[in-house]
Image (tube, coloured by chain):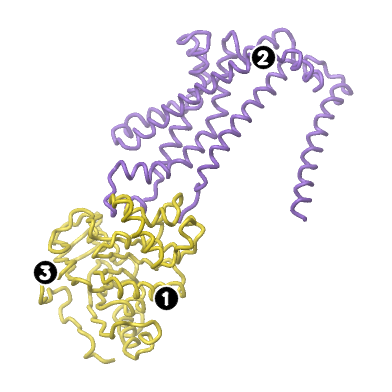
Chain colours: A purple, B yellow
């Protein structure tokens, strides 16, 4: 069974690569005598995370809440706006150029403004997550609708399909793969937005914990937070990937 | 060349006398269509009788698909008139089934889902729809593939499914826009035979757009030949081959070869 053995070999490669990487980190910093506030050995990061696990968990949930609410709001507003721009030539002339222009604004530059507008707490971070996730979703949704096959649209017209029927039976399923692609891009961006918001000004969340760790030279804790943020992002991304599996007709033209 | 077998119109585009006007299903009179400054169709005149099988034959880009879209009510036209059963064509009609060349299946639906799509859109009652779909899947030899998705089928099977989709509604008029144009020659021949069988069993008025001379001769009662730039009908040939036709016997007839040769000459394929 060459299939099984080649997959086994692939696993062995991956595990030994990362194992070697971690070992090099662990003993490299000791061997080269790197100061622990610059780069702590991986074992002390693990210890730091374990010792502060309750604290990290609490801050993680807070950040996760910001990301999920911001992302959900971005999906709702993004899809609605994408649909409005798609059906209305007026919106296409007015709103869409505005959206495109705003997209080029560095969203991180808006973080201080969000804090002025919405305060130090939860809402300003939700707003940041929203701002980061919103644009890819609008663009992808609109692209999905606009990419509906002209042949199929004509086919539906030949069948006297009404606008609502054409929308639910043809345009919506046609737009789904592109929409999911938008979500794939938007989900990690929502996390980035929330963390930037927390770094700029907050009293809770993983970004806040990073600021506290940096201020007290707890580089091990900072690394721990970065790793936890990455793991949460990966899990969220995996959830999107899982949802994307149900939209299997991506790229299939028949 | 047995010229007696063919009716060559001395002045193409002129109105032909028809015995029973009520039996004219599809008609165009002085039809013109332009896309911007490009004239796509010029002074198109023809009539297709009830249950007649007429092919429109022409090179690609001659406007034959545009003509079908006008008759189907999918695009507007500038002057002249197109009628279905004497009524001016304004929008797509429920008594017409249209089969397109490609990309006419929804990839996320099964074969059954695609075949019943038209029936669903036109709100056919569920019981009637189910039995009609079962019958059509049977006729199209797709029963075994009812739960497959279109991308799992061959091109020929997909085209059978899209013809089936049009037939489920049992429309008296069938418009086909190069339905076999994207298929290989062998599959195309097979589907020609199947289409002929279906047409002989369930008579319909058919307007078939094609660029295959053999296909047009084999299937049609009459062939309208179009030339391009601007698209106009330059010749009309009555195919006087006996019916019911049969794959091997009809294609082996000397007259079949003569029609093919003559149409080739008209189209400038052979000299």
Q: Chain of mark 2?
A: A
Pointers 1 and 2 within a single chain: no
Question: Residue drawn 25% across and 78% down?
Answer: B221
What residue sits right under mark 2 in the picture? A210
Q: Could you tell me which secondary element the residue under label 3 belongs to? A: helix
Camera-nearest label, 3 or 1: 3
Which residue bears the numbered disc 1? B189
Give the crowd class for mark 2: few <14, some 14-19, many >=20 residues within 10 Å. Answer: many
The vertical placement of B13 against B36, above or below, is: below
Q: Quadrant of the N terminus of chain A?
A: bottom right
| Helix, strand or loop under label 2 | helix
Report which residue position mark 3 lands on.
Answer: B22
Residue placed most toward the observer, A123 or A2: A2
Q: Is residue B141 left or right of residue A22?
A: left
Q: CA distance from mark 3 to mark 1?
A: 34 Å
Residue shown at the point (68%, 12%) measured from the top left:
A55
Percent coordinates x, y for residue A198 in the rendering:
58, 14
């Amino acid at each position: 069974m060459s299939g099984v053995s080649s997959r086994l070999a692939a696993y062995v490669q991956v595990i030994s690569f990362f194992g070697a990487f971690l070992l090099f980190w662990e003993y490299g910093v000791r061997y080269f005598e790197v100061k622990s506030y610059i780069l702590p050995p991986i074992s002390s990061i693990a210890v730091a995370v374990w010792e502060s696990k309750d604290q990290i968990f609490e801050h993680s949930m807070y950040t996760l809440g910001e990301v999920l609410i911001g992302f959900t709001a971005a999906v709702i507003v993004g899809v609605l706006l994408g649909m409005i721009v798609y059906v209305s030539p007026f919106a296409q002339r007015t709103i869409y150029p505005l959206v495109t222009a705003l997209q080029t604004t560095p969203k991180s530059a808006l973080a201080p403004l969000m804090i002025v507008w919405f305060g130090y707490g939860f809402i300003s971070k939700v707003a940041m997550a929203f701002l980061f996730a919103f644009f890819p979703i609008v663009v992808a949704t609109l692209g999905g609708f606009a990419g509906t096959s002209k042949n199929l649209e004509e086919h539906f017209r030949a069948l006297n399909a009404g606008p609502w029927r054409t929308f639910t039976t043809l345009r919506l399923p046609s737009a789904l793969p592109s929409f999911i692609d938008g979500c794939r891009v938007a989900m990690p961006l929502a996390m980035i937005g929330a963390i930037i918001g927390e770094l700029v000004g907050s009293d809770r969340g993983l970004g806040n914990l990073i600021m506290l760790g940096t201020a007290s030279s707890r580089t091990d804790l900072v690394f721990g937070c970065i790793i936890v943020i990455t793991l949460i992002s990966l899990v969220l991304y995996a959830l999107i990937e899982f949802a994307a599996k149900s939209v299997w007709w991506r790229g299939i033209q028949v | 060349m047995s010229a007696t077998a063919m009716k060559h119109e001395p002045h193409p585009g002129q109105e032909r006398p028809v015995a029973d006007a009520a039996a004219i299903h599809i008609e165009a009179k002085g039809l013109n269509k332009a896309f911007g400054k490009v004239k796509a169709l010029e002074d198109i005149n023809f009539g297709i009788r009830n249950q007649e099988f007429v092919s429109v034959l022409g090179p690609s880009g001659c406007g034959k698909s545009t003509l079908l879209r006008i008759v189907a009510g999918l695009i507007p036209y500038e002057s002249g008139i197109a009628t279905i059963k004497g009524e001016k064509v304004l929008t797509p009609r429920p008594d017409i089934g249209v089969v397109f060349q490609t990309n006419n299946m929804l990839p996320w639906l099964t074969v059954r889902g695609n075949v019943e799509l038209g029936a669903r859109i036109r709100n056919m009652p569920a019981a009637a729809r189910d039995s009609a779909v079962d019958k059509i899947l049977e006729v199209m030899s797709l029963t075994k593939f009812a739960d497959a998705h279109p991308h799992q089928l061959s091109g020929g099977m997909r085209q059978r499914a899209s013809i089936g989709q049009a037939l489920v509604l049992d429309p008296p008029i069938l418009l086909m826009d190069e339905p076999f144009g994207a298929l290989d020659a062998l599959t195309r021949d097979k589907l020609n035979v199947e289409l002929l069988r279906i047409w002989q069993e369930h008579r319909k008025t058919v307007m078939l757009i094609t660029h295959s001379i053999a296909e047009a001769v084999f299937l049609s009662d009459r062939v309208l030949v179009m030339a391009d730039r601007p698209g106009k009908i330059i010749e009309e040939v009555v195919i006087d081959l006996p019916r019911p036709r049969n794959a091997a016997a009809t294609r082996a007839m000397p007259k079949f070869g003569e029609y093919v040769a003559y149409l080739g000459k008209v189209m400038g394929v052979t000299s």
